Amino acid sequence: MQFRLTDEELELRSRLREFVDSFSAEDMREIRREIAELEADRQAPRTFAPRLAQQEVLGMGWPEPYGRPATQTERFIAHEELDSAGLPTYGMEQAEAVGWMLARFGPAALAEQHIPHILDGTWSYAGGYSEPEAGSDMLALRTRATLEGDHFIVNGQKMWTSGAHLANWIYTLVRTEPGSERHRGLSLLMIDAKAPGVTIQPVRVMGGWRVNACFFEDVRVPLEQVIGERGQAWRMMAEALDIERSMSFGGRESRLLLARYLNRLADTGTELTEAHYAELGELVTELEAERLLGQRVVAMGERGTIANGEASMSKLQGAATAQRTAQWLVDRLGADALLDESDGLAGDVEHFLRAATVLSIIGGTNEIQRNVIAQRWLRLPRA
Ligand SMILES: Cc1cc2nc3c(=O)[nH]c(=O)nc-3n(C[C@H](O)[C@H](O)[C@H](O)COP(=O)(O)OP(=O)(O)OC[C@H]3O[C@@H](n4cnc5c(N)ncnc54)[C@H](O)[C@@H]3O)c2cc1C
C-alpha cells in the first residue's frame, strides 16, 4: 500500500499551490462579491473561471482528442488544492461532467461546438436531472421530448437545478422514447437556457443557496443536441458518475475553516480547555477519515474497480463531519464573534453551519447513501 505521489503528481500540486497563492486577499473579496451578486454559491464566472481556464486543469482525463491526459489521482489533487483554498469550483465540476460525456460519447459535432468553450471557461452549464416528484427516484421523471421532424419538443419541469440562472446550457434528462419505462428510453438533451419556452425561477434553500425551478414549455431542441446515443442516457450517466469521484462533500471546506480558527487561536494566544482539545482531536480524526475514504474511491477508480459503496461512505462521512465541524466552531466562537468582522471567520462559520445542512441532500440523500452501502457493499437484499 502506497500513499506516495508520483513526481508528476507532486509537480501538479506545487503548480496549483502557486496558482492558489496568486489570489490576493482583494481577489478573494472580489470573488465573494461576485458570488453574492449572482447568488452563485461556489461559482464565479467572471473573476475565477478565466483564471482557472489558464491553468489547464479542465478536461483532465477526458478521452482523446478533446481532453488532457491525466490520472484520477491528478484530478483529485486539482480539486483538493482548489477547494481547500476556498476557491469556487462548482462551475468546474458541472463543466467537467458534461465535457467528459461529450468527449466520451459525442456526437462529434456537439463536442466540437462545446468543448472549446468549456476549456476556456466561457460557457457554463447546469444539470437538469431532478424533478418535483423525481429526486431520489430519478427514473420517475416526467419531462418528455416528442420528435417533430428534426426537432424535439420538450415539456416538463426540473427542480433544484443549481446554477441554471447563470448557465448558457442546461443538460436535461428527458424521456424521448414513447412507451418506454424507468431507465430505458431516456436521453440527455443540451438545451439552450435562453431558448423560447424555458423559464427559470429562483428557489432559495437553507444556507443561502439559490437553486432553480426550470420550466420547459414546447421548447424546440434540434435532434443534433442529444448528448451521446438517443434513448441510452442512463448507461452514459452510470459511467459519468466516475467523474464525481473526486468530489468532497464538505470535508475540504471544514478543514479550511478549522485551519483559520486554529490560526486565530495562535494569533490571539487564546487557550482551549482540555475538553476542547479532546473534541478537536476527534474532529480532526473524522476529517482525516473523510479524506482517506475519498482517496480510496479515487484509487479504486484508477484500478477500474467499481466503488459504489465506498463512494457512498465518503459522501455520508463528508456531510456528517462538515455538520459536526460547523457546529463545533459555532459553539467555540460564540454569538459575540459574529460582531467581530476582523477576519470574517465567524460569519463564514455561521454560513457554513446553514449551508452544510443541504450536504445531506444534494447529490443523493443520506438515506439513499445508506441503502447503497447496505445493498452494494454489505450485499444485503433489497428491502
Ligand atoms: C442545494 C441543492 C442543490 C441541488 N442541485 C441539483 C442540481 O443541480 N441538479 C439536479 O438535478 N438536482 C439537484 N438537487 C436535487 C437533489 O439531488 C435531490 O434533492 C435529492 O436527490 C433528493 O431528492 P428529493 O429532494 O426529491 O427528495 P425525495 O427523493 O422526495 O426524498 C424525501 C425523503 O425521503 C427519503 N427517501 C426517498 N427514497 C428513499 C428510499 N428508497 N429509502 C429511504 N429513504 C428514502 C429521502 O432520503 C428524503 O429524506 C439539489 C438539491 C439541493 C438541496
Image (tube, rainbow, N blue to C red):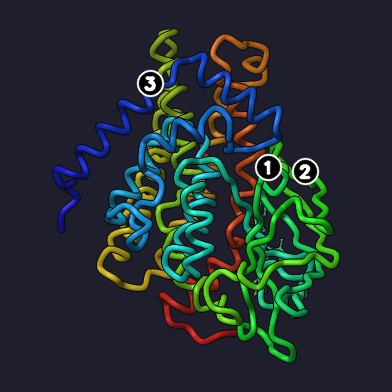
Residue at mark 2: C-beta within 8 A of ligand 1: no
Say the numbered circle drawn on residue 166.
Answer: 1
Percent x, y of residue 151: 73, 73
Where 26 falls versus 234 (above or below)? Answer: above
Question: Callout 3: 10 Å neighbours few (<14), some, many (20+)?
Answer: few
Q: Which dot, 3 or 2, sits closer to the camera?
A: 3
Q: Secondary structure at mark 2?
A: strand
Q: Which dot, 2 or 1, sits closer to the camera?
A: 1
Q: Between disc 3 and disc 1, whose residue precedes?
A: 3
Q: Secondary structure at mark 1?
A: loop
Which of 254 and 73 lies nearest the eye of the viewer?
73
Quadrant where ligand 1 appears: bottom right
Where 322 falls versus 310 (above or below)? Answer: above
Q: Residue furthest bottom?
A: 179
The amino acid type of the residue labelled 2 equals Arg
Q: Pointer 2: what residue?
A: 204
Which of 84 and 69 lies nearest the eye of the viewer?
69
Question: Callout 2: 10 Å neighbours few (<14), some, many (20+)?
Answer: few
Gap in Å between the C-alphas at discs 3 and 1? 26 Å
Percent x, y of residue 367: 60, 66
Q: Residue at x 69, y 41 (%)?
A: 209
Residue contact at pointers 3 and 1, CB within 8 angstroms = no
| Quarter-of-image position of residue 16 | top left
Q: Secondary structure at mark 3?
A: loop
Q: Pointer 3: what residue?
A: 22
The amino acid type of the residue labelled 1 equals Leu
Q: Between disc 3 and disc 2, whose residue precedes?
A: 3
Q: Residue at x 72, y 42 (%)?
A: 210
Percent x, y of residue 78: 35, 42
Q: Quadrant of the C terminus?
A: bottom right
Q: Residue at x 72, y 67 (%)?
A: 221
